[in-house]
Amino acid sequence: MTRFLLRRLGGALFVLLALSVVVYAAFYVAPGNVAQIACGPRCSPAQVAQVSDQLRLGDPLYVQYAHFLQGIFVGHDYSTGTGILHCQAPCLGRSYQDDQQVTQMILTKLPATASLAIGAFVLWILLGVGTGLLSVWRRGRATERILTGLTLAGMATPVFVVGLLLIIVFCSALQLLPFPDYVPLTENPEQWAWNLLLPWVSLALVSAAPYARMTRSSMLETLAEDHVRTFRAYGVSERGLVGRHALRGALGPVIALGALDIGSMFGGAVLTESLFNIPGVGRELVDAVKNVDLPVVVGLVLVTGFFVVLANAVADILQAMADRRVVLS
């Protein structure tokens, strides 16, 4: 197990380093005048040259990338023309638009995205795995066909359509819930939950569909294995086979898919945050792209990659705990 964990940790660090190289090359080495973007369209050539010197764009590319990594691990100093500003590690740069540290901007937006991601994740896991389990237990009956149809409908429906329908029905027509307006958990936990209920349900209804199909297919595959047929021949009940053996066999793929989804969600659910007025990192990314704010875009992409890699590493550990054969792979 120790060797397995070290291998996974080494692989995760390598992926993060490779991601930083790709992201830096895509946004800073690609054709385009970074100094002009940072300064703005109304800057004179002399002002653009001054910004280029402040950003050290005249240095060789490997030196620029080394300064980029240095900012992440030990911090970075920025020249303002009249003084020096220090950006503490992990430093992802300073915003061209607001002149704020990107790390602080992300940390400010991250709690809202985390609230959305964790609540929706719990709901769609329960709904998806429960639907898959029920369809296997009632296989060959009308219940299975109905659940399969609902699953396909959920996979085909965009999340903004589901969200709009929920707002129209529960906020406008029935007036059972307030129109979503994000409230931080530390200010009012009750209002925090009520205002996030519709976003959670919207994401859960759409995201649970792949889990239901994967759970169903994995459980049916497990039920067809030789050892399960042996248990059935010895008189083990169908409910026991489905709940004890088939469900455990389906956990591996569900954990792997869940790691990808929750990692991506921490990077920002752009449509959901925009629709329900949630001030998370997804909306921040949209604004940064509109304003061509490269440090913010780069920082958000790196943070998204970090959460995806972290979630996959945790998923590997959970799979190894559930199935010892994973450790030997």
Image (cartoon, rainbow, N blue to C red):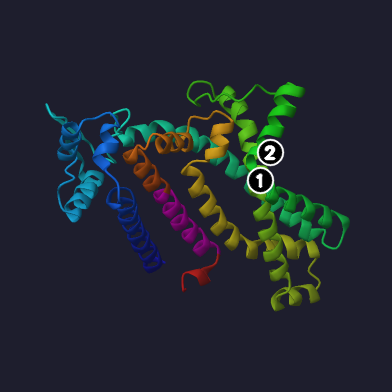
Q: Is residue 258 left or right of residue 21?
A: right
- In the rendered image, residue 102 lying in the magenta stretch gets the answer no
Q: Indicate left or right for 111 with 72 as reference.
A: right
Residue furthest to the right in view is 142
The answer to whether 255 is drawn above or below residue 271 in the figure is below
Give 35 or 12, whichever is nearer the viewer. 35
Residue under the image location 39 percent in, 50 percent down: 306
Considering the numbered disc 2 on the image, is that residue within a helix, a strand or a loop?
helix
Predominant SS of the magenta segment: helix
Q: Residues within 10 Å of mark 1 (few under 14, many from 20)?
A: many
Q: Is residue 174 in sight in this rendering? A: no
Residue drawn at 56 percent across, 57 percent down? 257
Is 315 magenta? The answer is yes
When the figure is inspected, residue 325 is found, relative to residue 260, above or below; the finding is: below
- Mark closest to the chain's N terminus, 2 or 1: 2
| Mark 1 element type | helix
Q: Which residues lie in the magenta part? A: 305-322
The mark found on residue 206 in the picture is 1
**Callout 2 touching callout 1 (CB < 8 Å):** yes
